[in-house]
Amino acid sequence: MNKTIKTLTEKAGKILAARDAQLQDVIGRLEKERAVALEQKKAMDAAAAAADTAAFRTAKAAYTEANENIEMFEASREVMESGPLVSEDEYNDAINAIIDAIDAEHKQAQKQIFALVDEIKSISDNLKTTIDDGNAALHKWQIDVYRDDLGSMSYATGIYIKEKKWRDYALLDFADRVTNQAVYREYKGLPVTYRFS
């Protein structure tokens, strides 16, 4: 993995882990406040039943405080779960650094891959020349030297039925497909034709 990408991935993991720890703390405190609110509600009911105004006021104040705390912890949880964990500047810096790292790696890989494609093109050109020269030599030997009767021509292929000829062009077709990719042709400054099927 690229060093910049690895560093920023680890940093994002640490930010998320810290947020998760804070979130768990908030959820724990929220549950405690809910328990306090429930307890104080019961205390208010008991004080009301006993007509104890002092106990009722104390329980009601604790109940109100617990509900305010619940409201604050729920808002805090919502912000932690849905709000950004970093500033917009820090986010943009990280995004730009990752894109720059990918771009640099892409440019390096492009040079290496296209060097290999250049080599494939050279090998393919040499093979095509060898096949063309070989087929011409086969024809010369079969027709001019041996004076073989070629039989009838196939209308489907344009080749005489008995003609000796190299017919395996799969490797050249493969090389042609590789060297005629639009991205390679653009890189080499060659015209590009897009085919849509």
Image (spheres, rainbow, N blue to C red):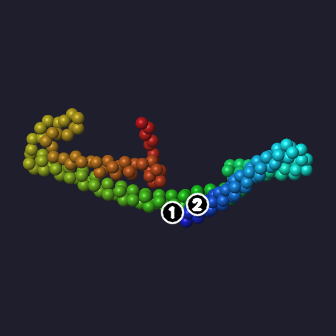
**Residue 29 visible in image:** yes
Q: What element carries label 2?
A: helix
Q: Residue furthest top?
A: 155
Task: Look at mark 1 in the image and give the residue it sits on.
Answer: 1
Instruction: Answer whether labels 2 and 1 touch (C-beta < 8 Å).
Output: yes
| Image vertical order of residue 83 relative to residue 119, above or below | above
Question: Label 2 neighbourhood size at 10 Å, few (<14), some (14-19), many (20+)?
Answer: some
Alpha carbon distance from label 2 to label 1: 10 Å
Residue at point 18% right, 47% down? 165
Q: Residue furthest right?
A: 53
Query: Which percent across, then down, holds residue 146?
Result: 8, 48
Q: Which amino acid does label 1 sit on?
A: Met
Query: Which percent across, then down, holds residue 196?
Result: 44, 38
Residue at point 45% right, 45% down? 192
Question: Label 1 neighbourhood size at 10 Å, few (<14), some (14-19), many (20+)?
Answer: few
Residue at point 19% right, 35% down? 154
| Image vertical order of residue 11 relative to residue 172, above or below | below
Task: Look at mark 2 in the image and give the residue it sits on.
Answer: 9
Q: Name the residue nearer the viewer: 25 or 1.
A: 25
Residue 91 found in image quarter? bottom right
Image check: 101 left or right of 80? left
- Quadrant in which the C terminus appears: top left
Q: Which amino acid does label 2 sit on?
A: Thr
Residue 29 found in image quarter? bottom right
Q: What element carries label 1?
A: loop
Image check: 57 left or right of 99? right
Residue 4 found in image quarter? bottom right
Query: Which percent across, then down, holds residue 53?
Result: 91, 47
Q: Residue furthest front?
A: 50
Q: Name the residue nearer the viewer: 12 or 155.
A: 12
Image check: 105 left or right of 140? right
